[in-house]
Amino acid sequence: MKIYLTTPIYYVNAYPHLGHAYTTIVVDVLARFFKLKGWQVFFLTGTDEHGDKIQKTAKEKNKTPEELVDEISLAFKKTWDYFKISYNYFIRTTSSSHKKVVQTLLQKLYEKGEFYLDEYEGYYCIGCERFLTSKELDEKGQCQDHKVAPIYVKEKNYFFNLEKYRNWLKYYLLHHEVIYPEFYREEVLNLLEEELPPLCISRPKSRLSWGIELPFDRDYVTYVWFDALINYLTGIGYPENPKWKDWWIEAHHFIAKDILKPHAVYWPIMLKAMELPMYKKLLVHGYWLVNKLKMSKSLGNIVEPIEISEKYGKDQLRYFLLREMAFGYDAEFNFSNFVQRINADLANDYGNLIYRSFNLVEKYFKTIPEASSLSPLDEEFLETVKKALKDYEKYFLNFQFHRALERLWQAIRSANVYIDRKAPWELIKKGAKEKAGTVLKILLEGIKSFAIALYPVTPETSQIILKTLGINLNSVTWDMVWNFSLLSSSTTISKGKPLFPRIEMEKLSHSITKSSTT
Ligand code: MSP
């Protein structure tokens, strides 16, 4: 089995914030999950480096566009490397390989007669890097996402007739489950009820020089979205690498709802016109909000992912992001939610279970005990864990991460109930050491399954847990979650330090959001 996973390529006009980190972490979690399941994974991320926005930011900072894009692209790469994001390739749209692919495809479309020159006037939002329709403006006539009025532009440009493909796209989306969650598919189908305006695919060099030259008219550069979307092909070696198509038909694009239209309307139509197959899925999530407003550089309410991870841990942040946001919907980021989740789920439920179990084994057995015959309560507990793991896997395959984690936590909580009901410390006092050993062996097998299942979400702590249990991460596969007699009795257990220390509320004196980053 193969899967090709992509994040958006991020604009390099500002440093990465938690919103960018969310999409990238979601894709990393899935890449790790599918690899555990033995799938071949190709994971692409990168930076979108052309366009008005970049040229404007460079000017404001007294830098050349080249200096700006090199600096901020590196900051994205460093951030993903800090988070040990398992991407296979980091694409930059200023690379010569990407420029070549864009120009080849533009030339092909030009020769097919897909472009025409025309005079255009309209309202352009630099933040969105696209013309907005009147419906996309708020009551003040501003862009709803960026809260700024779009600029009026009138110029001669090349256009692409999207309308020609509207019915094809409508039919395709109606008959294929491409867009998830379903309500975004509905949103796109609604958009396709009305005529699509032509897409302006060029910018005159006299106004914007920072872009890829049109191969058929050197007075123009390519519209940044036309350039950017093609990264998904360049990233897998299109057209030279003969394997590109095998990956392409398994393409899963992860985005937030801000860029739904370019991905769900422009991109499929571009592919159709280029006579290339459609991607497989478009997975759309909501926004991280701070006080009900979208977290963004332009609104000045961003959270820095490295800073928060340095303080509270990378796995803690990954868990929080995946658990707190219902994929598709908006979620509020605030410290109180963050601390509550870490303390309740990770420190209390999961961390305590592990610490208590390891502590008892170290104290009374030193090595992993053997299980003797299982009581109905032991069997019942293992059944609960198996069922939760089945659902966890199912939810993961449906991209419902918060549900998956919520379900797994039911099993983690039942493990805490099981240990309390069985009270192995009492059994030892009563001289029933063998029975206590069985309980602890079952618990350690359960913890092993939790640690494997959670490896995609909390890789660092899972690795520590599995190492303590004598399991080498490189040999781990998903199927091991079902095996409750996996652990070797020759493994010596040492409880180590608590993996998820509680966060003390009183220590949180600072505010997490920043008013400006760059
Ligand atoms: N360069 C384009 C994408 C081109 S893809 C061919 C772009 N870049 S961006 O830097 O603005 O990134 C937008 C993406 O960043 C969102 O779609 C989402 O993945 C992520 N997010 C940025 N802010 C976010 C939130 N506040 N909340 C959730 N995700 C956010 O658009």
Image (cartoon, rainbow, N blue to C red):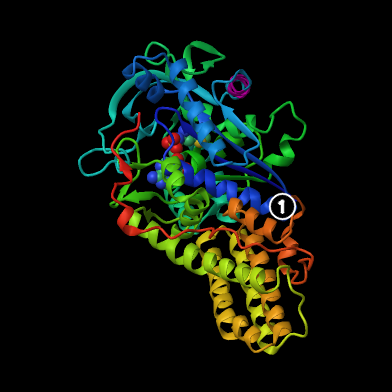
Query: Residue 88's quadrant in the figure?
Result: top right
Q: Position of residue 197 (x, y in %)?
A: 41, 35
Q: Nearer the viewer, residue 317 or 22?
A: 317
Quadrant in the picture for the C terminus: top left
Residue 391: tell me if it is visible.
no
Q: Secondary structure at mark 1?
A: helix
Residue 425: tell me if it is visible.
yes
Please state the total of marks drawn on the protein image. 1
- Does 99 lie within the magenta span? yes
Which is the main secondary structure of the residues drawn in magenta?
helix
Instruction: Left or right? Give the position of 119 relative to 172.
Output: left
Q: Position of residue 466 (x, y in %)?
A: 68, 58
- The residue located at (39%, 19%) in the rendering is 55
Query: Residue 391's quadrant in the figure?
Result: bottom right
Instruction: Left or right? Give the position of 41 relative to 16.
Output: right
Instruction: Work out whether 46 lies above or below 107.
Output: below
Residue furthest to the left: 140
Which amino acid type is marked by label 1? Leu
- The residue located at (58%, 66%) in the rendering is 354
Q: Position of residue 377 (x, y in %)?
A: 65, 87
Q: Position of residue 89 (x, y in %)?
A: 63, 33
Instruction: Work out whether 413 lies above or below 224.
Output: below
- The residue located at (51%, 30%) in the rendering is 47
- The residue located at (44%, 36%) in the rendering is 16
Q: Which residues are magenta?
A: 98-108
Question: Callout 1: 10 Å neighbours few (<14), some, many (20+)?
Answer: some
Q: Quadrant of ligand 1?
A: top left
Q: Nearer the viewer, residue 263 or 472?
A: 472
Q: Badge 1 is on which residue?
A: 473
- Does 79 lie within the magenta span? no
Instruction: Left or right? Give the position of 1 relative to 319.
Output: right
